[in-house]
Amino acid sequence: MIALLDFFRSKRKDALTQESVLSEDVREEIRAHGTPKIRVIFMGTPTLAATLLSGLVEQKYNIISVITKPDRPIGRKQEVTESAVKKKALEYGLPIDQPEKLDEAAIEKIRALKPDLIIVAAYGKILPQTLLGIPGFGCINVHTSLLPKWRGASPVQNTLLAGETETGVTIMLMDKGMDTGDIIAQKQIAIGADELREELLLRLTEEGKNLLLETIPLFVRRKTTLTLQDSTLATLCQLIEREDGHIIWTDDASAIYNRYRALAPWPGIFAFWKKDNELLRLKLHRISYQKQSPQTAHPIGQVFEVGEKVGVETGSGIVFLEEVQLEGKTRLPIAEFLLGNKEIIGGFLQ
């Protein structure tokens, strides 16, 4: 088994390729040979991973186990909730395991299944080196960025926060580092100027599924060449927390808009407004912006009317409030919000 990994690594390029190109003769080979008869373990947790699992099942891969995180209490009511991957595995009648830890007992259980390949997508835990060495074809990971850019757990959010105009999907052979393994295949896509995180993630998920299904047959038939990541070009994801949604009005309007795109719907963006001597959280559910400030100068953070719109002065440009929600109240379009909160005009958000 180890010899197979040595074979793949011996066919490794030392320069990063930006996109996998599958020739028609290779596609014909995939069609001719069909789905490889290998024993596959799938590891993942959220909707992204569930979509990939569906693709594998539809292509009739032999999924011998689905490993996902344990059920957790979620939301204000703390209701115990199954992961998207568990729900999908139950739908297909696949065997499921939900270890609390990838400890020695969990690893031995995986070893006993004798997998040929382990496929990982947003599992949520670091895989130990002893686990990576079990399958003959190794462990491959589907990552929603063009590695080595945005290594880590929140690549889509970080891509949008940075205001980037393109991203993609990477399939890599995992090693002991965090998203540092050799690249098997990549697909690059453009990002829409107003595309929100969930919209972009949906497209990346579909691209990831298609790329994975094209890549596995080539990989197991030794038709791929691994590419070493250039670590000098690596960027790391910041962890996303609730307070990251707090808007700093000295930022440029475009940067604030990118924060909105990256963090919708969770944690979302917000500011504070002092009403009746009480500082209240104001969620900004929908905003737009323009790069130029009006000819009439306003202090940073001040709310003012621009024709029929309501704007907030930023470090450069204006953010327009389209739909908001005051703490403890209902989410409203800005016109309806003003009916009971007219005093926000001329006030300040902080």
Image (cartoon, grey):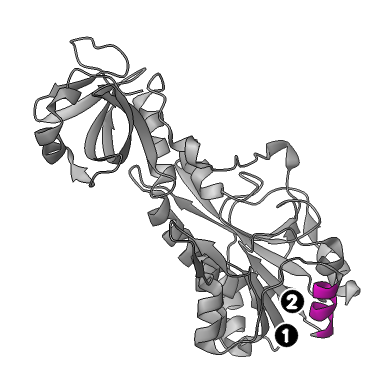
Give amino acid for label 1: Arg
Label disc, if present, on residue 39 of the rendered structure: 1
Q: Is residue 114 above or below residue 335?
A: below
Q: Who is closer to the viewer here, 258 or 298?
A: 298
Left or right: where does residue 215 sit relative to residue 350? right
Dot 1: element? strand
Q: Position of residue 119 (x, y in %)?
A: 67, 71
User: Residue drawn at (23%, 46%), measured in percent from left and top?
Assistant: 331
Location of residue 218 (image quadrant): bottom right
Dot 2: element? strand
One can see residue 210 in this view? no
- The residue carrying pointer 1 sits among few (fewer than 14), some (14 to 19) or many (20 or more) residues within 10 Å by Cα, namely some
| Cα–Cα span, label 1 and label 2 | 6 Å
Q: Position of residue 125 (x, y in %)?
A: 70, 59
Q: Main secondary structure of the magenta part?
A: helix
The magenta span reads 105-112
User: Residue drawn at (53%, 63%), measured in percent from left and top?
Assistant: 73
- 78 drawn magenta: no
Q: Position of residue 193 (x, y in %)?
A: 35, 42
Q: Who is closer to the viewer here, 159 or 87?
A: 87
Name the image quarter holding the C terminus. Answer: top left
| Residue pointed to by mark 2 | 117
N-term mark: 1 or 2 = 1
One can see residue 108 in this view? yes
Name the image quarter holding the N terminus. Answer: bottom right
Left or right: where does residue 223 sit relative to residue 301? right
User: Residue drawn at (82%, 68%), measured in percent from left and top?
Assistant: 131
Label disc, if present, on residue 53 of the rendered structure: none
Q: Position of residue 311 (x, y in %)?
A: 22, 26
Q: Who is closer to the viewer here, 261 or 278?
A: 278
